[in-house]
Image (cartoon, rainbow, N blue to C red):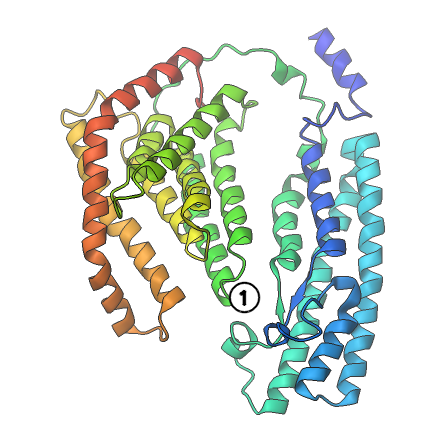
């Protein structure tokens, strides 16, 4: 203990290196600065084939205003007002860069003492996003008035003339993820104690705890909210951004497993291997439409490693496998669908192997029904939002009816693969979990 205390005292001023937890908020701030300086924040779809197609940088919003004036023939007074607001936003961006650089330097020097400046910097960047959103909304309202369109929700979001890109919303996402935990991330004095191996034994099953309930609520609220945010505010054009948000949100419930200790590399590697197997299985059966083992492997991961690990495995499998099958606005829906199937599998069959008489049969039945009802329903719903002209009851019924045969094939494949792979893979995962004490709270 004396040695640990001395190491903690020596760690009070300087971060240990690139692998320290203090680097997370630093890297988040770097991402925000790169977003402000290097990416477009504003998009005007109608200028796609115009001389102003590449306009939209935060520091050069005057170019966007000129493009709007060139395309829509707006009054000169409106253009001057937009230019003036763009000048104020550029000053705000300069302040953001100064605050961000000061926070990065201070975080390396005094770490936890930089949390106040860090919170100020992240909040300021979020305010910049809000100001740009106000600038875009005000411009949209003025253009709608010129064209005689009504200023309603749809005309100011999906059908708007001026839209914010994912780079702008990144500031809000990172602030929500970093600010609540900034103090703990910058305080690395307890990091040394976690380096010593701890004696871990399998804990007694006490049922579904508060952590799992919290994870379930997060999965059913935050992730669907992110998906619908992409539909209504990003017009289904930033699927990579939405997918990365889902992966980050998927990691939060998973890492709640380690609330009282530090995760070891072997624990994360197991999840990565299961996700890789799911991706490889989907690629290996590419010639058979919907006949894939991906859902079965995701369910096995959830049952063998925990509900949170099942959701993370499903989200990763959906994202990575689409690098082979094609990324698009359907990717976030697939990630969520695979994830929720794995999460519910881990929740229902939590430590029931060897205790239920017909465990394997029940697992196969769950696999088929979950893919048919949950996965199929979510992907068919996504198809209505993505590919059909009108969103109404008839469109949903038509899509559910046309997608039912494919969902039956997918569900049948899941049953078959669970029947063949379920028992041997679960036995291996249980042996690894008990031998190395992994994924135990």
Q: Is residue 105 above or below residue 39?
A: above
Rendering coords of residue 263 (x, y %):
54, 23
- Placement of the N terminus among the 4 image quadrants: top right
In front here: 299 or 204? Answer: 299
Horizontal relation, residue 401 to residue 242: left or right: left
- Tell me which corner region of the image, top left, top right, bottom left or bottom right, holds residue 130: bottom right
Local secondary structure at mark 1: loop
The residue depicted at 63 percent of the width and 90 percent of the height is 146
Q: Is residue 221 above or below residue 90?
A: above
Q: Position of residue 124 (x, y in %)?
A: 75, 55
* Whether residue 42 is visible: yes
Image spot of residue 71 (x, y percent): 67, 83
Viewer-side residue, 329 vs 197:
329
Q: Which residue is mark 1?
A: 233
Quadrant in the picture for residue 419: top left
Q: Name the spot of residue 182 as percent of width and height, x first.
A: 68, 39
Left or right: where 380 falls relative to 27: left
Q: How many marks?
A: 1
């Amino acid at each position: 203990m004396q040695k640990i205390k001395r190491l903690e005292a020596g760690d009070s001023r300087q971060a240990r290196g690139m692998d320290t937890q203090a680097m997370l908020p630093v890297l988040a701030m770097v991402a925000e600065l790169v977003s402000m300086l290097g990416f477009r924040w504003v998009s005007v779809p109608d200028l796609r084939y115009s001389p102003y197609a590449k306009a939209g940088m935060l520091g050069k919003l005057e170019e966007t205003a000129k493009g709007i004036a060139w395309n829509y023939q707006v009054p000169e007074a409106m253009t001057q007002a937009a230019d003036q607001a763009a000048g104020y936003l550029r000053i705000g961006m300069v302040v953001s860069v100064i605050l961000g650089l000061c926070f990065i330097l201070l975080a390396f020097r005094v770490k936890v003492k930089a949390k106040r400046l860090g919170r100020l910097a992240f909040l300021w960047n979020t305010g910049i996003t809000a100001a740009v959103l106000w600038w875009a909304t005000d411009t949209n309202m003025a253009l709608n008035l010129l064209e005689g369109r009504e200023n309603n929700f749809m005309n100011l979001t999906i059908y708007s003339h001026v839209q914010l890109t994912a780079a702008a919303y990144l500031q809000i996402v990172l602030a929500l993820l970093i600010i609540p935990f900034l103090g703990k991330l910058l305080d690395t004095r307890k990091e040394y104690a976690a380096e010593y191996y701890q004696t871990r034994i399998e804990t007694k099953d006490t049922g579904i705890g508060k952590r799992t309930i919290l994870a379930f609520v997060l999965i059913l609220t935050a992730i669907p909210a992110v998906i619908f945010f992409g539909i209504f505010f990003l017009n289904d054009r930033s699927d990579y951004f939405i997918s990365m948000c889902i992966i980050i949100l998927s990691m939060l419930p998973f890492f709640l497993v380690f609330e009282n200790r530090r995760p070891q590399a072997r624990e994360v590697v197991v999840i990565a291997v299961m996700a890789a197997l799911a991706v490889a299985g989907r690629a290996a059966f590419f010639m058979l439409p919907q006949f894939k083992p991906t859902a079965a492997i995701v369910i096995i991961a959830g049952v063998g490693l925990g509900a949170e690990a099942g959701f993370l495995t499903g989200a990763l499998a959906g994202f990575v496998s689409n690098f082979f099958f094609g990324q698009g606005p359907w990717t976030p829906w697939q990630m969520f669908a695979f994830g929720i199937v794995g999460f519910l599998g881990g929740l229902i069959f939590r430590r029931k192997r060897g205790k239920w008489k017909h465990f394997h049969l029940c697992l196969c039945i769950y696999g088929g029904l979950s893919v048919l009802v949950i996965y199929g329903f979510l992907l068919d719903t996504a198809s209505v939002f993505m590919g059909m002209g009108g969103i109404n009851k008839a469109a949903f019924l038509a899509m559910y009816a046309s997608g039912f045969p494919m969902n039956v094939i997918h569900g049948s494949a899941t049953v078959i693969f669970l029947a063949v792979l379920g028992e041997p893979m679960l036995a291996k995962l249980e042996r690894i979990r008990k031998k190395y004490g992994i994924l135990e709270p």
